[in-house]
Amino acid sequence: MRLTGGRALHIYTWAIIAWLTLPVLVMIVFGFNDTPGRYNQTWEGFTFKWYGRVFALDELTKALVISLLVAVVTAFVAGALGTGIGFALGRYRFRGSGTVNLIMFATMSSPELVMGASLLTLFVSLGVGLGAVTITIAHIMFSISFVAVVVRARVLTLDRSVEEAAADLGANAWTTFWRITFPIILPAVMSGMLLAFALSIDDFVVSNFTAGTTTTFPLWIWGATRVGLPPQVNVMGTLIFMGGVLIAVATSVRSRPRKRS
Amino acid sequence: MSRSRRVLAPYLLILPGGLWLLLFFVIPMVTMLSLSLQQGDVVSGYVFTGHWQTYVDAIGNYRTQLVRSLIYGAITTIILIVLAFPVAYWIAFYGGRRKPTYLFLLLLPFFVSFVLRTISWRYILTDEGMLLGPLKDAGLLADNFNILGTPVAVIFGLVYNFLPFMVLPIYVALERIDPRVVEAARDLYADPPTAFRKVIFPLALPGVFAGVLMTFVPASSDYVNSAVLGSSSTTMIGQVIQSQYLTSSNYPTASALSFTLMAVLLVGVFAYARALGTEDVMKVAAR
Amino acid sequence: MQSNLPDPSLIRGLTQRRLGRRDALRMSGLSAFAMALAACGVKGTGSTAPSAPAPDAVAKYWAGKTSNGKVDFANWPLYMDPKQPELKKFTAATGVKVNYQEVIQEMGPWFAKVQPQLAAGQSIGYDLMVITNGIQFKQFVDSGFLAPLDHSKLPNYVANADKSYADTAYDKGNVYSVPWTSGITGIAYDPKKVTRPITKLADLWDPAFKGKVGMYSDTQELANFGLMALGIDPAKSTAEDWKKAATKLKEQKSAGMVRNYYDQSYVDALGKGEVWITQAWSGDIFQKNVSDGTDFKFVIPEEGGTIWTDNFAIPITAQNPLDAIKLMDFFYEVANAATLAEYINYVCPVPAAQEQIKQDAAKLTGDDKTAMEAVADSPLVFPAQSDYAKLHYYVDFKTVAEQQEFQSIFEPIVLA
């Protein structure tokens, strides 16, 4: 349903996409920069060597590993907790669903700064210290709602007739859930887990407040900007970027409806 | 399933997640409020005294930053609506079968940590860097001209980082518009601009409103963009709060400011939701 | 006429709901909430008016500590040759591996970062750290976060260090720390952009450098320059003086002079041309010139400069304190103190190193030789008594209240 200026808008949209991608390109390109000193700002020549030396900086590698571990744990725990909430909200009507909705809305729209700061005050008041555990706790907290929303949307559109058929054939509720319902909602659960993973690995603000001296990948970058980012950061960023792209493309290809033969 | 188990089922399902949120979202808000009313120092500890003066002092000292943050947030949101609407419009109406691809391309940069992307912009925009250097050498810019350190740079960063959050909700709303409605408008002799103004834009409004919700709050409370791209004249309240917690260990003042910021934003959000009808906003925001 | 019905107001009064079940729930919820608020409190681990450490504290701490063959060392940037020759020498001599991390950029954030973990008795991942004498040093000590040092494990320190360090105001008797280096805060500038020689603090207020001045975000550094610019001795300053200094610093800011308030990253800003003239630490500029081939100049202003000491300290939750104290002592061998000072160009705490550097210079030729002789004679590395006359320490506080007042006066300049 065209109205006006399709051409102009087309060019505009591509310009915006280009603008959004520009810093990513700069990051990728400078991962190939043949820079000698601590600084990676002026182009000195093309080289692949940083890809060979990607794990040369121990602390950076350690930070990346911690980021990945935290993200994996977050994906699974938030995935489980969030699926429970999402399923309950989508399937049942119960007292308190309004409150749950409200709290979820609050976690998604609260400023990250406030969530991180308030967690710091909790941990300080309890005297439990900070570290990878507190980071993970925080990440799970803000990921639950996102998983729940994704799962709920799927559960709402679920066709109950399959479940009813299973019940008619004598399956009890437990069996019906695990063998019929869960496999159907599994793609939504996985996409929620993927979302939790992405949110966790990129998180900076909340981690900043709950990490103490532990470093995650974004925290390491933040700390290193004072003395200059080494090319390894560009390489790792590029690899994570490529990894994310591949996973996204793979999941979308898999979910394309198969042609009937 | 027996009746009582059916009734219990939802509660059991939400119990683990709900408990987690209670312990690590709700209760921390209480501890933060409590700390804001405590006195002492980081060495000998803090004691609850119910002392409101902390709020008065904190807001008095940093009122400028608070107002500045809300202003930057508002400017960012308005610019975003203007920039994002045409993109959402084009993808929704002209995207055809490639709509998912365009959305994917839009979200692609988010696979790189936003700290890294913002720092990349810092390199691009630096005083003698790849953008300004050649322009200065060619004499087009004064030698001491700088983008970094100005409000322009900070808002530029905010707009950049939150653009997809505005495009997506508007796109979703536009996508749901029934083409027959627009056809009807055309049948009734509406020309394209009128059709847009009277039919399309109003139907897109819930998307715009959801987008505002998802960008104004994080933009106002952001501190990374100002820290990386700004200077001390662009200090936002987020930086003040972060500094009070993580540089000065001044927990009461930090908590007071944090709580105030949240209260201001929450009041804004709920008034906003009230004005539009909570259901609409929650529905689209929950997408 | 008399009615049989009771007074309507009486009926109203009798039938009005007073405290229903909902109200009771609400009130108990609120009072639970209020109790929860009040019950929260942050326990401090120390006191701000502590007594001297118990005489057996040293023995108690060091009893049963074993060597694990590694040390995690947290330091500031630009405090060691990136090739780490001294650390390699240490590992070769003792077999102890050193993990050297330049994670400290400013004292405030460092203390705030490690405080929750130390208060919880948790390891911070480091066995050795270098901290500046000042507000946070005192907070570390008062909170009980530093291990008392066993001087029997520091023979080189006792033999080779300048004796004045045993009698400092911030750590008399070196109970918790021994110096790493001392340094001087002065002014650094780019002579290509700043065309006249810089000699005074007042130059940081010169409108010719509008928008190109860098100042420190650390309140103690900032305050000292503000006080000295007004001719006030920081050691004798009062709250009135602080307010005057704050006004002067605010003028500098509102005149648009200051590009930004920096921590260690001022060196980067100077290098990129974001600032042309800035507060600076003496050795940083020397190292920047050597490593990047730049030609920045460092001066101690006429009105005065700030002198501070960065000190080795062992956090109380350190996992490898024995190896840490071994490393501490290693840097007090004259040869090691000399090579360190040759690279970092900061005030060396070992006087005998001066002679050592001259001997090292004699083995070189040409430019290298003159450069190293310059280091041996530099007042920035081996200041004479007279050089100290113009140098002042940070402001010292008698009570926590004074310190909090000081912070509340100067913090808004940086943040606001």
Image (spheres, coloured by chain):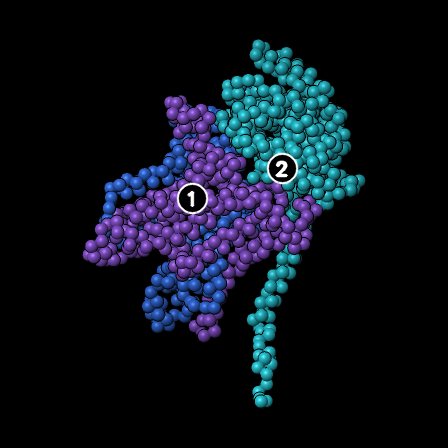
Chain colours: A blue, B purple, C cyan
Residue situated furthest top in the rendering: C366
Q: Label 2, label 1: how many angstroms apart (C-alpha)? A: 31 Å
How many numbered markers are drawn? 2
The N terminus of chain B sits in image quarter: bottom left
Q: Residue B50 is drawn in which quadrant?
A: bottom right
Q: Which residue is nearer to you in this view: B276 or A25?
A: B276
Q: Are marks 2 and 1 on the same chain?
A: no
Q: Within 10 angstroms of label 1, few (less than 14), some, or many (20 or more) residues?
A: many
Which mark, by number, is residue B89? Answer: none
Q: Residue C97, position in %: x, y?
A: 60, 32
Q: Which residue is tagged 1?
A: B76
Q: Residue C354 is drawn in which quadrant?
A: top right
Residue drawn at (39%, 50%) of the image? B211
Element under disc 1: helix
- Label 1: chain? B
Position of A101 with respect to C412 (left or right) is left
Q: Residue A52, position in %: x, y?
A: 43, 32
Q: Within 10 angstroms of label 2, few (less than 14), some, or many (20 or more) residues?
A: many
- Cβ–Cβ below 8 Å for labels 2 and 1? no
Residue drawn at (64%, 30%) of the image? C226
The amino acid marked with disc number 2 is Phe
Q: Which residue is tagged 2?
A: C410
The answer to whether residue B50 shows anywhere in this view is yes
Residue C206 in the image: above or below residue A237: above
Element under disc 2: helix
Q: Residue B6, position in %: x, y?
A: 45, 71
Residue drawn at (75%, 26%) of the image? C164
Residue situated furthest right in the rendering: C55
